[in-house]
Amino acid sequence: MSEILNEKETVLSVRNLRKSFGDLEVLRGVDIDIFKGDVVAVIGPSGCGKSTFLRCLNCLEDADGGEIMFDGENLVDMKVDINVHRQKIGMVFQQFNLFNNLTVMQNITLAPVLIAKKKIAKIKCKNRWIKLANLFKGKDKKKPLLEIEKPIEVVQKESEEKAIDLLKRIGLEDKANVYPATLSGGQKQRIAIVRALAMEPKVILFDEPTSALDPEMVGEVLDLMTELAKDGMTMVVVTHEMGFAKEVANRVIFIDEGVVKEDAPPKEFFLNPKNERLKEFLSKVL
């Protein structure tokens, strides 16, 4: 019984993940399991495949082989509807990727409202076919129409309320109706994180979230990420911030030459590295 209680819930399971760009083999067989509540810091030299690994997890890059198991399906399989799964895999980029022609509120509510509209449209389409089929069926054989759980107006209102709650959490509720161009880099990145949170993801992927920020703005973004970690959010963070990796992550992985060469708790990773290439890397960055 104790073994069952101690068993961790796997959020992402990656096996033999491979990705090439032309003749350049970037990922050569990555194997890793990400468990619920993990904060995994991913470090390694430039060009080692860190960002490509992250983009494959979110299906922004199509893997050439291997498995990425999420919610019981292999995301590498071309038959899988990745848009359904991507709703639960948040992504935060280096350059924020906010829509400059939309307000902060519109940026945060865009995805949940758009997804709701698509679901409603799909139900309406199915109902049209049900109505047509029912014309040729007896009274006792007619199928009931599918119910629309919430009208789009309700979804919009609820999404805006959630957005305000999230903005209050980061102290930026007064920025709800401004455009991203008026914000500092640190504010933009915190809004980008809130936008990911609005989808209630199972995991958030961070691709060097502080690399485009001025030094004085790095702290406010890392503070928010630290708060998310304390709340139990599962996170995979490609980062050059060794302090974050040491103090916030519960695991640190070292990717080099397209494979995971070390995966250990921070204390063991930094104080007692086993891989020779990692030892060399740490000697240059610490």
Image (tube, grey):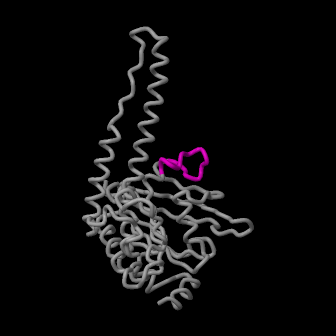
Q: Which residues are magenta?
A: 73-85
Position of residue 54 in the picture relative to residue 24 (left or right): left
Specify the quadrant of the image occupied by residue 264.
bottom left
Q: Which residue is rendered at x = 32% and y = 44% of the image?
A: 155
The question of residue 257 being in magenta is answered with no
Q: Which residue is rendered at x = 37% and y = 58% of the image?
A: 108
Residues 169 and 80: in front is: 169
Position of residue 281 in the picture relative to residue 1 (left or right): right
Q: What x and y, as percent, mark residue 271?
A: 43, 86
Residues 282 and 62: in front is: 62
Q: Is residue 62 above or below residue 247?
A: above
Specify the quadrant of the image occupied by residue 167.
bottom left
In this rendering, the count of numbered labels is 0
Q: What x and y, as percent, mark residue 31?
A: 55, 64
Residues 249 and 167: in front is: 167
Q: What x and y, as percent, mark residue 170?
A: 28, 68
Q: Which residue is rendered at x = 29% and y = 42% of the image?
A: 154
Q: Which residue is rendered at x = 51% and y = 53% of the image?
A: 69
Q: What x and y, as percent, mark residue 226?
A: 33, 73
